[in-house]
Image (cartoon, helix red, strand yellow):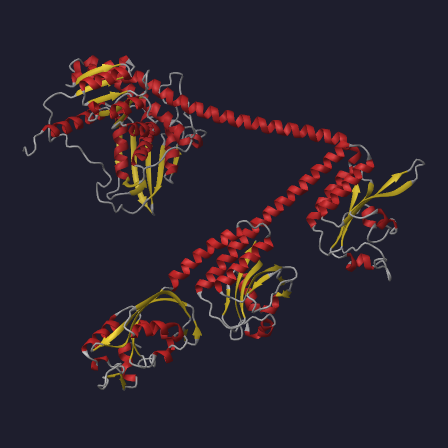
Amino acid sequence: MSIHSSFSSLPEGGVALPVPGADRPWPVFASVKPDSWPEGMQAIADLIVASHFPMFIAWGPELRLFYNDAYAESLGDKHPNAMGQPFPLVRPELWPQVQPYVMAALGGQPVHFENALMHPVRNGRVERRYVSASVTPVCHDGNVIGVYFVLSDTTSRVLAEQRHAFHLELSEALRPLVDAVDIMAAASSLAGEFLGVGRVGYGEIDVAARSISVDRDWTDGSMASLGGQSRPLESFGPAIVAQLRKGRPLCLDDIALDERSAPYAQGYASIGARSMVIVPLIEEGQLAAVFYLHEQRPRHWTDQEVALAEDVARHTREVVRRARVEESLRDEKRVLEMLNRTGQALASTLDLETLLQAITDAGTGLAGARFGGFFYSAQDEQGDSLRLYTLSGASREEFERLGSPGSTAVFRPTFDGEGPVRSSDITRDPRFAALGPGSGMPTGHLAVRSYLAVPVVSRSGMVLGGLLFGHPEPGVFTERTERIIAGVAAQAAIAMDNARLYEVAQKSALERDALLQSERAARVQAERLSHTKDEFLAMLAHELRNPLAPISSSASLLSMQFKDEPRICQTTTIISRQVRHMSRLIDDLLDVSRVTRGLVKLKLAVVDFRDIVSGALDQARPLITEKGHQVEVALPAGPVHVRGDQTRLVQSVANILNNAAKYTQKAGCIALRLEAHDGRMLLTVSDNGSGMPPELVPNVFDLFTQGARTLARSQGGLGLGLTLVKRLVELHEGEVGAHSQGIGQGSSFTLALPCVDAAPDTPGAGAGPQEDVEGAALARPLRLVLVDDNADAADSLSTLLNVQGYHTAVEYDARSGLRRARSERPDVMLVDIGLPDIDGYQLAQQLRAMPETSGTVLVAITGYGQAKDRERAIAAGFAHHLVKPVDMTALVRVLESVGAAAARAQTPAGAA
């Protein structure tokens, strides 16, 4: 019901407003109808009603309420009757907390409070809310007649902050703890104090016994501890147990009223609980434990409190699990150390008594027994059998009056070699009871409840004796203990032969260590060889690119100077084509090395795969044209968007096209078909070339794999291209495939990638600023300085640039380049990285520091072409990084950009 619609249902009347110190009659306003109020009061009422924030006025001597819909939500079932009623009567639970602020505002002083914890009653339930409010005086005719509240419920924010702080405190408190019981106790204490509950703890589930046990818990003093108690699961009610087994938290605001727990309310009352939250902890699909919060009176549990309980339960359980693993590891370490010491003792002597005493001591410690004994058979000098024993944890006098173990149901299985005997409580064991009346522990007998006996059997099958252990507490020995003692028994059985076995063990240990050291050395050697290989590949690329640079430049120079000589043009075309082929081989070799080591970083963007196909065709066109192939391309009419690195995708498709062109006879046919459906695209590249034998198809994408070729190696290549395709496509979460009907039947390669929606970026976004190379022209030739210790490369490139109209100078070492740059102040310096005196990076840094060359554009011309080389060059001060042999188109584009920038800089300001 809205505030406006509630007016008609409220009683009307007037409230006299006294003005302190005045003798005139107090003004009278309608209690709840603001349309009859004075204009100022009506404005405030309109503001309150229109606001989406909780607001109200409490005015007059009785502080009668006028509020909006937002505040009505917090009143619950008190609305609409609260309209016009005195605030202290509507909110008696809040009045003591709010009264100081109201009195201050009635005194003319605006006040506010932040994140105050309040407990309002709504719909009959007490809630915990954090509230911030501004309390302002309401004036009429110069007098304060009431207060104006603007409220903000900050519960979610405060609880989030408190929850975050609590988690930090919990993590800090649990970090140094190693004992599982201490961890659960600390977590219970922190959770109980933080949530303000009566009792918090963990209950462990015994699946076999269908019971829940509490080791210890935390209480605030208002409830009794459940520590040390165990109860059947059924006592909580089947519906509740079923919910917990499903891993769903249980929240009971009032156990007596909840239909799931009401029939079992008496059982809950026996532990003093009236409301609770239980968080189940599931391990291996079964209910393993619960984390519980108990209150002795009904309580409305908020979602935040339940969520925090879940967080604490799971966080603590994980810490407990880790602590138990660490404890298990420590115990395992202790066991291994004791076994090691036992083995050392066995290896250090051949004296049987000493050996068996060491076994008894070790077994008693490993089993966690209070006392232990090793009863074994021996022969005296006359050959008569004797039953001897060694003891640990008890004196021989205590055993002397007990006599030797007899052939009873308890001891016979051990000395007959039938297997271990383990009892959680031997006093309640049927085998013990079978000894008959009066067979209880004799007077003076060591107190034994937990019992473990393991036979000691030689490798020949003869029973040598038995290891017997006892403890006064029940349930001490576990299955794991039995296995450990069985191992100790096996050591005892071979004690006499231990010297030989120890020697073998030591030899095995040395061999194992030697193998480990050999493996480590091999790993180090492999890593060193891998690093050496990478360095070799980088140096090989550099050394191969260096001679290619002058060859390429010389070929370009010849083609320019003798463009009318067909034979020379044909020769230079062949040279240029082979240089490009050589460059591609070098790039593939380096790319494969980087891809296989996971060093390739993709520059992902949303691209149209039709553009990828077009770019790949442009790259492969020289080889396709050379061999006279016919290319058929079928592309969709609309875009096919994928998310990928355009350069790497173009490289992948180009490698497939080059492979098809290479292995297809001249004047062959290559077909490309691009399709997109069901959120994926598929590119198929097929040819009518030489095809592949069936045994090659599954391995065609493997490194260095190629089809059979003649000794002439007419097809060329290193078998790297398709490997690169596979690795790069897989980095894009795609797949590649190959198919061929056989030799001479052609081949078909497929490339599949997931499609994405069109990129929301503005067309052209991400592209760098383009230099206006046509808008201005430099009146003089650009001054260039080339610095390269490879004289052929430097001279040929200098000659080629001179022919194109640039003014060039050449130096063959860095220091000469510095002097030349200082004197001539060139526009551009083309610098090799691998210089003899100082490298190109250092030269670039020095050039950048010189005022004479502060405006010089530095271009790295180098054989080092990996990504890290490019990044290092840019960091050293180079503006551009070009790999040998230099792409003259790219170099000319750089030089034209520099020339245009220089021309603009010389143009007078304001010139047209």
- Which residue sits at x=65%, y=43%? 332
Residue at the far front: name it: 21
| 758 shown above or below 531 | below
Where does the C terminus fall, quadrant-wise? top left
Query: Front-most of 322 and 90?
Result: 90
* Image coordinates for residue 236, horizontal then vertical, percent: 58, 68
- Which residue sits at x=70%, y=51%? 478
* Image coordinates for residue 276, horizontal then vertical, percent: 52, 67
- Which residue sits at x=27%, y=79%? 5
**Can you see residue 872?**
yes
* Image coordinates for residue 855, horizontal then vertical, percent: 19, 26
Along the horizontal axis of the image, is 496 left or right of 723? right
- Which residue sits at x=51%, y=75%? 257
> Number of callouts in the render?
0
Along the horizontal axis of the image, is 753 left or right of 329? left
| 221 shown above or below 802 | below
| 226 shown above or below 66 | above
| 649 shown above or below 794 | below
Query: Front-most of 539 and 303?
Result: 303
Where does the N terminus fall, quadrant-wise? bottom left
Query: Front-most of 713 and 337?
Result: 337
* Image coordinates for residue 676, horizontal then vertical, percent: 31, 44
Along the horizontal axis of the image, is 112 left or right of 694? left
Query: Front-most of 783 and 93?
Result: 93
Along the horizontal axis of the image, is 886 left or right of 249? left
**Can you see residue 571?**
no
Give the quadrant of residue 859: top left
